[in-house]
Image (cartoon, rainbow, N blue to C red):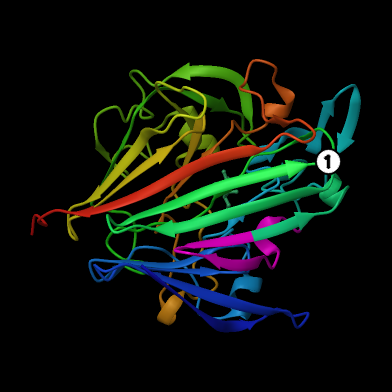
Amino acid sequence: MEIKKQLFGQTKTGEAVFAFTLKNQAGTKAVILTYGAAVQSLEFAGVDVILGYDTMPDYEAQDKYMGAVAGRFANRIGGGRFQLNGTEYTLCCNDGANHLHGGICGFDKKVWTADVEEDTLCMRYTSPNGEEGYPGTLCTEVRYHLDEENQLQIEYQAICDTDTVLNLTNHSYFNLNGHGSGTLQGQEIQIFADFYTENDTACLPTGVIASVADTPMDFRQPHEILERIDTDFVQLRHAGGYDHNWIPNCFVKEQMRKCAEVYARKSGIRLAVFSDQPGIQFYTGNFLDGIVKGKKGASYPRRSGFCLETQGFPNAPNYGHFPSTVLRQGEWFRSRTVFAFTKEHPDT
Ligand code: GLA
């Protein structure tokens, strides 16, 4: 495995942004930017399966969290408010009346520092006390490693000087027939979950843990992503497609399990997602709009990429019955996600 560094561009404020290319012996290549610690591309079996942009102005012009680390708190916090140790905290609201993916200037818009430690890329960002309304100075480290089995391994670590809340994820959009190949047609997904968290009209959990049985949310057997997406099912109507937190079975703290698998018939590429987190947001790019042109002039219209965001439950700070997302002062947060790629014979 080799890691190469090159200048990618600079932010509007003149900060340099670097691109690190991780390459294994099979020729699989991942490019990670210091902007948002974002995965900019992932080339496997000759196909670039991740949506992204070629320039910094494009990254700064989009609001889709393209490839980035979402933080401090991935997904939504209702009303941008939560209580911790009897104090109410008010966060910046950037999604109507709610807080989304860390707020107005979340981790996706920060320039991270980067070091190469042997065959791992380590990115760090220190979020000052009060940033976007969150308590405590939080040091976050995200480690990227591409192994010889074509697995992109992501490790998250964080520590804070006060009690706080935290939910970190990666917001890569995948299209296993290649970025810019159009919609998600011909790609089937399996999610190993009996339950999901039901949403309200603002995509916020209602608190109800719902069974997937007899609904278009049931992916215990593989189904085409687009097969049932426009059915007249209230949860899909609310979100304009899939944009929900599934609860993969067999959650044991700090243990990895397979959460989901996606297969594209045309390319023969299969992606398996492993995580130690209690939830996974399956989002079908319902808000992609093709406005900012993607890499090499590609267009990213609605539903041309899917995200599998391993995470704590959305709005967990406001629900006592959701797994806790509280990070105690001085305790290490540690979490892992693996995106594993294999190739089968394409059908056509
Ligand atoms: C997440 C959310 C979506 C949307 C995207 C970003 O996946 O759940 O509702 O906000 O991020 O566009």
> Is 236 or 16 nearer to us in this picture?
16
- The quadrant in which residue 143 appears is bottom right
> Is 133 or 164 nearer to us in this picture?
164
> Is 343 or 116 nearer to us in this picture?
116
Q: Is residue 281 above or below residue 13?
A: above
Q: In the orientation shown, which residue stands out farthest toward the front?
A: 118
Q: Position of residue 25 (x, y in %)?
A: 26, 69
For the point 73% across and 79% down, which residue is it?
Answer: 15
Q: Position of residue 28 (x, y in %)?
A: 30, 67
- The quadrant in which residue 291 appears is bottom right
For the point 83% across and 43% down, which residue is it?
Answer: 134
Q: Position of residue 91 (x, y in %)?
A: 83, 43
Picture quarter with the N terminus: bottom left
- The quadrant in which residue 38 appears is bottom right
For the point 88% across and 47% down, which residue is it?
Answer: 130
Q: Position of residue 108 (x, y in %)?
A: 65, 59
Whether residue 348 sits left or right of residue 192 in the image: it is left
Q: Is residue 107 above or below residue 210?
A: below
Picture quarter with the C terminus: bottom left
Whether residue 209 sits left or right of residue 28 in the image: it is right
The verdict on residue 107 being magenta is yes
Q: What segment is highlighted magenta in the picture?
A: 105-123
What residue is pinned by disc 1?
Answer: 161
